[in-house]
Amino acid sequence: MRGFWEREPTGEQLAAMPIPRNQYGSLADLVDLAHTHGYRLLGVEQASLDEWDVFENGHGLAWERWLRANPDSPHADEVRARADTHRGYRLRGWRGTLGLAYLTLQAP
């Protein structure tokens, strides 16, 4: 699984996530990258927004459950900050902009 820009991110979106613009290209760029390393594309699938949401909700739920079970932990503030930061990355940055692709490749 690898990321690609589903659509060009705005400056505001880039500022809201820890990903530099040049870290990803288009889906076609991703396939071209595999080809430059000698791989042949056998299939490509893109994760849907629903799949992304299920994946990301799992992270958020795990952090919130931990916080609920450990409210007095000396690490609670750190975990809360991590959860809040990640939520911002997701909702203000990559959601609907960064795509995930599953490439089925044949090795050289």
Image: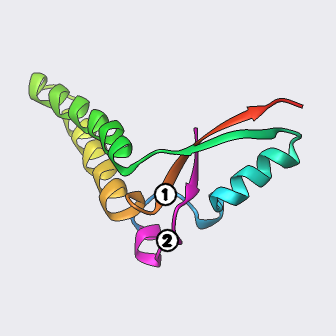
Alpha-carbon span between mark 2 and mark 1: 8 Å
Name the residue at 16% across, 28% down. Answer: 65
Read off the residue under disc 2: 9
Classify 89 as above or below 8. Answer: above
Question: Does 57 sit left or right of 71 as displayed?
Answer: right
Q: Secondary structure at mark 2?
A: loop
Pick the quarter of the image with the C terminus: top right
Question: Magenta stretch?
Answer: 1-15
Name the residue at 39% across, 62% down. Answer: 93
- Callout 1 environment at 10 Å: few (<14), some (14 to 19), or many (20+)? many
- Pick the front one: 67 or 108: 108
The colour style of the image is: rainbow
> In this view, which residue lies farthest toward the top?
69
Read off the residue under disc 1: 98
Which label sits on residue 41?
Answer: none
- Pick the front one: 45 or 62: 45
Classify 2 as above or below 6. Answer: above
> Is residue 75 among what the camera can see?
no
- Amino acid under disc 1: Leu
- Callout 2 environment at 10 Å: few (<14), some (14 to 19), or many (20+)? some
- Amino acid under disc 2: Pro
